[in-house]
Amino acid sequence: MPNTRSLLRVARRLTSDTASAEDLVQETLLLAWRGLHQFRAGSNVRAWLFRILFNEFHGRARKPWATVSTVPLSFDSQRTQPSVEQAVEMSQALDNLSLEHRTVLLLGIVEGFTSQEISDILSVPIGTVMSRLSRARQALRDQLTAAPRYKCASEEAS
Amino acid sequence: MSNHDEDLELDRRLRQEILSEPVDVSGVEQRLRRAIAPSHMSRVIRAVGAAAAILLFAVLAFSTWRALVPHEPVQVCSDAARDHLREIVHQEPRRWTSDVSAIDRLAARIGLASSPLSRIILPGYRFERGKLCRLDGHVFLHLVYSNGAREFSLFLGNDPKLEADRYAADFGEQHVATVRSSQARALVVTGDSSSVALNFAQLAARAL
């Protein structure tokens, strides 16, 4: 199914664990399936799906029993490009950002949405999106600068 | 490196690191298919059910209309022309009777006046044989008359649901005319002409 990978990638950065992320994406796609008649032909289906995802995510976050936090993701140790070290460093830096900053970076930089599309998805003014994006970049840069270099267990052992 | 270049480099790194993370969507897709399948099926079942209900309603409405509302005897005439073509022109085998008393009994069964054969006088023609038949669901007495060279069919019935005191139509080479009297309906099918059909139908209807 198209867009599932993108939705799950972002959902994993929003929710507390993989199961919650899969639940969120499943519910998003079900809502899209049921509300297909509401989709306006010719408009951006990816942006529509992400708007549903964020609405559902914020709806869940408002429930008293919901938790919104992130946990470190697992990495494939066989990966060569980019290195595990770099990946973990960036991943941890991203996870340490506020939800607002993390969100605009994921949508704008990783998923490639324009500021206008992010504005539509998150229902915030475009000026807010642009300033958040600028601040999010700076926050990420600060995190990367401040964070100690990650070392693999094998490197530490040697 | 300018701020813009630094931003571009940071964006490139972020995109590269995050997009290279493995994302397994098989679990979500399986759960989604399971969730959608019953709902999709139930929609199909509901659609089929609705279509069946509409069809049933249409059939019932049409049947009721046919049963209760008087209508022109087009179908009756069409069926009569078809029967005449098959049974008289093409001589397909049927169980006929030439016995006058048997014809009287058949006439009585469908509520016609007694002894129709003795009442109906058609100049130049004599009664040959007869039987009961159905035209558009109505029971008629099918009588065959002959002048030695040609034959025509006279159908006698008694159904108030058929409208029109007089009705004539041609079906291919068969000319059909029907006339209703206060007692019965007479319907003639002949290959001769429309006027002959109408004339004989009038004579038969008046006689009953």
Image (cartoon, rainbow, N blue to C red):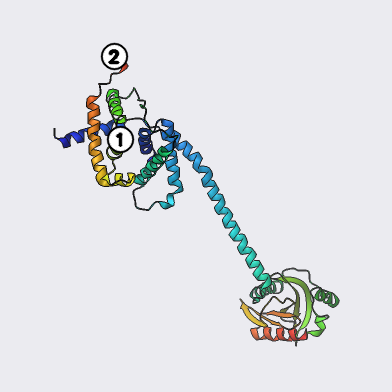
| The C terminus of chain B - image quarter | bottom right
Position of B7 relative to B181 (above/below): above
Q: Which residue lies furthest to the top in this view?
A: A158
- The front one of A114 and B159 is A114
Q: In which quarter of the image is residue B165?
A: bottom right
Q: Which amino acid does label 2 sit on?
A: Glu
Task: State the image coordinates of residue B177 (x, y, percent, origin top left).
Answer: 67, 81
Secondary structure at numbered mark 2 = helix
Residue drawn 76% across the image and 82% down it: B183
Image-based side of B31 in relation to B88, left or right:
left
Q: Are marks 2 and 1 on the same chain?
A: yes
Q: Which mark is residue A156?
A: 2
Within 10 Å of disc 2 (Cα), the crowding (few <14, some 14-19, many 20+) is: few
**Camera-side residue: B166 or B52?**
B52
| Residue A14 position within the rendered picture, expressed as x and y whole percent measured from the top left | 36, 34
> In which chain is the residue bearing label 2?
A
Q: Is residue A151 left or right of residue A33?
A: left
In which quarter of the view is residue A6 placed? top left
Residue at the far left: name it. Answer: B1
Q: Name the residue under label 1.
A: A102
User: Can residue A2 be seen here?
Assistant: no
